[in-house]
Amino acid sequence: MPVADAETQTLLNSILSRLQAVGIGTLADTLYVPLETILQAGINRDELIALDNFFLNQGVTRSLSTGLKQIRRGETVSIGCGALDSILKGGVQPGLVTDFFGKSGSGKTQTCFQLTMNACKNGSPVVFIDPSGTFRPERLTQMCESRGLNPDSVLSSVYVARPHSVSDQMRMIQEFEDVFSLRSAKLVVLDGLTENFISEYEGQQGLIRRQSKLAQHLHDLASLSFRAGLPVVVTNTVRTRVATASLQREIESGGNIVAQGIHLRIRLERTGRAWVAHIIQPYVEDSTAAFRIGPEGIIG
């Protein structure tokens, strides 16, 4: 068996650690699992090529990178903040569901606005699903004007939808092309993933049905992103879990169901006038970025 050089071996070890986080035990196992499952580990195109070469050196052909080209018909959408784009390998990726979660004021909706602005600036359509009523055209206008963009052109490319129930929200994804009369979109944003689920299925008595519906919704979001080859971005809140009388910790709303159904999870936090983003799933090196939010949007 050919021996990989030190640099290649380091890359393969990094790939393997992320594959194991989504349940793929060895590099050889990638020969038998769907490409969509491999992508859940956050493996990028260059890393797929490295895997192709690894197998080729052992006399096996998988052509993962070729499959990626067939899936990812869309484009990466940049946030326009160097620090964040750096840890995201250029921005939010087509074919993947990216989740920004955190407390109120941590920058979730501002991230959605900036992604929307950047995706729309050349006239491409963006679908912004807004269960919580957070979409503010005046804020998007302010960000556009600060960056020399035409706000009317950007806003005219945004399709805003406000689902008032779980069934409304799920239908918008399941029947996406018919609901929005779009043959394609550059980006889908869902600002408030679990809001309707939590309000509609309250307490412990609604837990099983809420989690079941949420799991289906996450599957539909992943399927849309994969099928249409576009980035899907969701935001989510956190809640406090009481372990003991003296021990509390914050977890993402939806718990393990969300963790299992999302490709890339980024926790946003704010301390004073400073913000931090940290990729918590899958494991990657250089996973933290500091940024600020001003009138012009997210910078850093």
Image: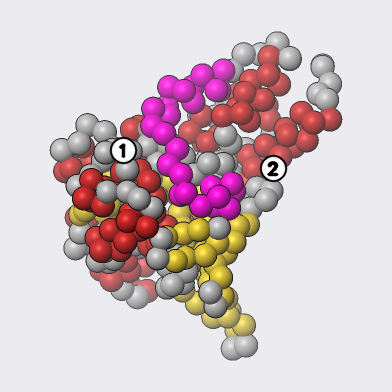
Q: Residue at x 51, y 52 (%)?
A: 81
The residue identified by callout 2 is 17
| Above or below for 203 versus 229 | below
| Above or below for 276 versus 127 | below
Q: Residue furthest top?
A: 59
Whether residues under marks 2 and 1 lie with C-beta atoms below 8 angstroms apart, the answer is: no
Secondary structure, mark 1, is loop
Q: Residue at x 28, y 58 (%)?
A: 141
Disc 1 residue type (three-letter): Asn
Mark 2: few, some, or many residues within 10 Å (few <14, many ≥20)? some
The residue identified by callout 1 is 122
| Above or below for 144 versus 228 | below
Sequence-wise first label, 2 or 1: 2
Q: Would residue 46 appear left or right of 140 to someone viewing this image?
A: right
- The part of the image, by quadrant, that contains residue 191 is bottom left
Instruction: Report x, y in % for residue 145.
Output: 32, 56
Query: Spatial distance from mark 2 to mark 1, Cα to Cα?
Result: 38 Å
- The part of the image, by quadrant, that contains residue 205 is bottom left
Q: Residue at x 69, y 33 (%)?
A: 26
> 287 or 137: which is nearer to us?
137
- The part of the image, by quadrant, that contains residue 14 is top right
Q: How is the image coloured?
A: secondary structure
Q: Which residues are magenta?
A: 63-87
